[in-house]
Amino acid sequence: MIRKLYQGISDVVDQTGRVRKQSKGPQPHSPLPTSAKCDKLREECGVVAIHGHADAARMAYLGLYALQHRGQESAGIATADGQKLANIKGMGLVSEIFTDDVMEKLPGSMAIGHTRYSTTGDSALLNAQPIRVESMKGLIAIAHNGNLVNLGNLRAAMEREGVYFQTTSDSEMIVQLIAHSKAGTLVDAIAESLSTVEGAFSIVMMTRDRIFAARDPRGFRPLSMGRIKNPTGPDTIVFASESCAFDLLRAEFERDVLPGELVMVTEDGVTSRQYANGVKQSSCIFEHVYFARPDSRIYGRWVQQSREMMGRQLARESNVAADVIVPVPDSGVTAALGYAEECGVPFRFGLIRNHYVGRTFIQPEQRVRDFGVKLKLNPVRNILEGKRVVLIDDSIIRGTTSRKIVRMVRGAGAKEVHLRISCPPTVSPCFYGVDTPSKRDLIAANNSIEEIRRYIEADSLAYLSLDGLLGSCDTMENTGAATGYCTACYTGNYPTEWVDVREILTAT
Ligand code: SF4
């Protein structure tokens, strides 16, 4: 079957006939996991925006390329040239979708882009972004990172009033609210709409002649602003989910978009307004633990710096006699370096990751998936044999992967295997843009640390304390101000209302 993998152009279809599977709903409860379900939390989305560049589409492409770790399912770029607004999105990686012939169909000096792993809405091209909506206020395109939590109520109310939704994605809610707002100006309509929705959103928006960027009042997801100096004309203004994108664009990091801030960029320059005030900040701490790239600076602090501190603090809290410190690559590497430095035990790559395992193995058939860990990781026997090994990882979700890794290290001859996790136990699901299993599938929500240790077959198991994590991500030394963090997946204390109670009840 040939399946169309693009939206926005009619003459490019998938040449290979690849079909991406839809994501599946929650699995039935089991007290301890028995299957090899995906055992890592999924990245959310990445957004980028460019204003005032002759080749805005290519700049957006580069930005998305740097943000590919935030979502590999679909990507899209919308451009505007002052008159028209083009929008092309497709299924797959940024480099697969945006070939030269596709890029030629995206003219203009403004662009927004999005790379997605779906957290709400069907996992399909229909819900790929940017989403474009025609309204009384003109054409609006939006790219959104995060998750709205009052979607059901709002959507039902708007549908009763006759609003037709083109997608099942929560991101369309924001554009429809703008489109149907009675506010006199577009910027007032945007501010009003952003005040109405509850949840996590770092968004970039574009009309035919303007770019907007905004963060939700709690600042759940990161969003940074940068600038490319132009000696002969106006500077190019760029926005990206993570500052690592600016390096590829050769843009200078200027500042974070503030929680509750709406920034507008036009030919006349940059203006800003605070559409929400006085809301307690709750930026996602898991960005520092796992999601964001270590070369990014988010919420005013380098991710690398935070992860190294997590490792150091973990060593202070739960050191154990060992011969070698081994990271679970790639995300455990920086914390393992900090741990090794703190306790003075050698750091070694005792597990090697195969970087060429493609997305083929993300959701294959069960019998293939059982090979998942072995395909991704392989032990280095001469580093592990006869050693007391401390393994450093960033999370245990269902426990299935951790158990396989512990078995793998022991199978390679390790005398003892101690697992250390660079954050507290994950006990509650996320509703703010991170694809977490429901509570019944989170091993730490239903088992004590000792029960988990026995399940994963480690000699010892310890997690970083919540205070240790918060201290590792403290921004005071970087910015002179303390960032307020969301830690709901470790505490169950959600910073917003509108949480589905059925999801957070402990399994019985
Ligand atoms: S619940 Fe966890 S993953 Fe979700 S926003 Fe809060 S800290 Fe981040």
Image (tube, helix red, strand yellow):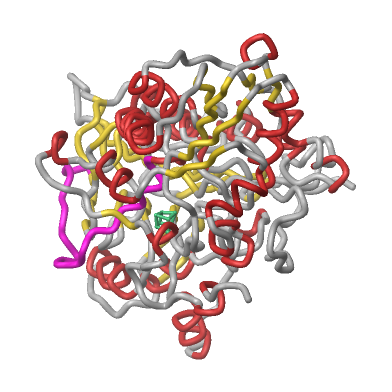
Determine whether, in the image, residue 255 is placed left or right of residue 414: left
Q: Is residue 187 magenta?
A: no
Q: Is residue 373 left or right of residue 118?
A: right
Q: Residue furthest bottom?
A: 160
The front one of 345 and 47 is 345
Count of numbered circles in the view: 0
Q: Is residue 162 above or below residue 265?
A: below
In the image shown, does 305 or 387 lie closer to the viewer?
387
Q: Dividing the image into four quarters, tell me where ligand 1 lies.
A: bottom left
Whether residue 89 is visible, yes or no, is no
**Location of residue 107 in the rendering, given as x and y in whole percent from the top left corner:** 47, 36
* Residue positioned 26% across, 43% down in the render: 299
Q: Which residues are magenta?
A: 267-288
Left or right: 112 as drawn, with respect to 8: left
> In terms of image quadrants, where is residue 301?
top left
Residue 412 visible somewhere in the drawing: yes
Please tell me which residue is depicted at 63% across the width and 29% down the height of the picture: 99
Which of the 4 quarters of the picture holds residue 423? Answer: top left
Q: Residue furthest top?
A: 382
- On screen, residue 32 above or below 227: below
Locate residue 328: give its quadrant: top right
Expressed as whole percent of the image width and height from the top left, the position of residue 23 reads: 70, 57
List x then y, in percent, for residue 340: 41, 20
277 inside magenta stretch: yes
In-front residue for pair 465/115: 465
Measuring 25% from the left and 67% from the top, which residue is drawn there? 191
